[in-house]
Image (tube, grey):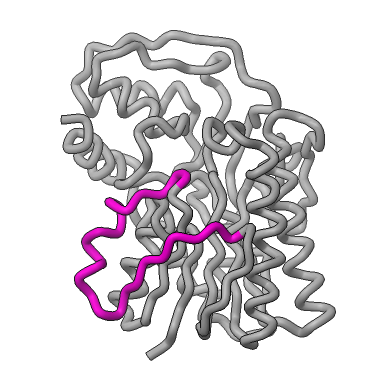
Amino acid sequence: MKKTLVTGGAGFLGSHLCERLVELGHDVLCVDNFFTGSKANVAHLLKYPSFELMRHDITFPLYVEVDEIYNLACPASPIHYQFDPVQTTKTSVHGAINMLGLAKRLRAKILQASTSEVYGDPEVHPQPENYWGRVNPVGLRSCYDEGKRCAETLFFDYWRQHRLRIKVVRIFNTYGPRMHPNDGRVVSNFIAQALKAEDITIYGDGSQTRSFCYVDDLIKAMVGVMATPDEITGPINIGNPREFSILELAEQVIRMSGSRSKIVFKPLPEDDPRQRRPDIALVNQLLGWSPKIELNEGLKKTMEHFRRLLS
């Protein structure tokens, strides 16, 4: 049985990944410091002998024996990563160093969950993996953007210097059940506001665009990338290339929820990207992967989760 470590395993994405790995027959060690993750996200997995939960902060070294490592640990929403920006950078950088050191000692394969934020506010659209990005290194979002960029640097330096088996995936906007209702992300914000009949807040005029990938599609691609031959390192974009304006998303959430919410507009935050859409030609070529779940279907499932949560 393959022993697999998932850092950030009690978070939104991490919990879905742990669930999938258990289904695939892995012996899963889920590590989380529960800053944004929740035991409730993985409580249903505790009944399985192949699943173990450990409280640990990866800015400190971890001594375990595993075959593969998925490094997902880091707050991923602006509200959470800006709460303690120094700790956010330490999680990305020190955490990467600690996990890479563990992988080097064990000769384990390791995957870094990077982000589309490495592209910043892009001048190239859609964003291919060979685009270097346009990132503000001293802004409010820099702790996350530059932390993730530095983590990618470390992964490729360990690959070049130590021939470590690495995979780097860049995750674009993902949504689904187990999102935190107060994480400040656009899908969770809109759904929570609509279900509570509050005003739906759009920052800017709503013309900025995003591409939304349902969590099950994303996890399938992530596990697929980990299984690729060692010479494939990435970075590899994972996301849904279908693009929606923020205003379109708000209107769709209101329509689907039957809410009486009104849309209100507020100033755009600093360095908020105008466009975000992945070029997924590489992952499609490698895995034959493309997202299957349409926004309507994914929003319905996510809304059901939020209804239960808010009730």
Q: Quadrant of the N terminus?
A: bottom left
Residue 125 visible (yes or no): no
Q: Nearer the viewer, residue 298 or 6?
A: 6
Can you tell which quarter of the image residue 133 is in? top right
Outermost right residue: 161
* Chain part drawn in magenta: 35-58
Residue 51 visible: yes
Q: 31 or 204, which is in the foreground?
A: 31
Picture layout, residue 258 above or below residue 52:
above
At which x and y percent is residue 282? 62, 66
Q: Say which residue appears at 54% left-offset and 45% top-offset.
A: 75
Magenta region includes residue 147:
no
| Place of residue 274 in the rendered image (x, y in percent of width and height, measured from the top left) | 64, 29
Q: Residue at x 53, y 10 (%)?
A: 266
Q: Nearer the viewer, residue 3 or 239?
A: 3
Residue at 56% of width from left, 33% of height from top?
78
Question: Residue 261 occupies which quadrant of the picture?
Answer: top left
- In the image, 41: left or right of 238? left
Q: Residue furthest bottom?
A: 1
Magenta-span inclusion, residue 56: yes
Residue 17's image quarter?
bottom left
Please state the horizontal and vertical placement of residue 130, each as a whole percent of the image: 76, 58
In percent of the image, x 68 and y 74: which residue is there? Answer: 233
User: With 291 as the anchor, is 109 left or right in this view?
Assistant: right
Q: Position of residue 246 (x, y in %)?
A: 48, 26
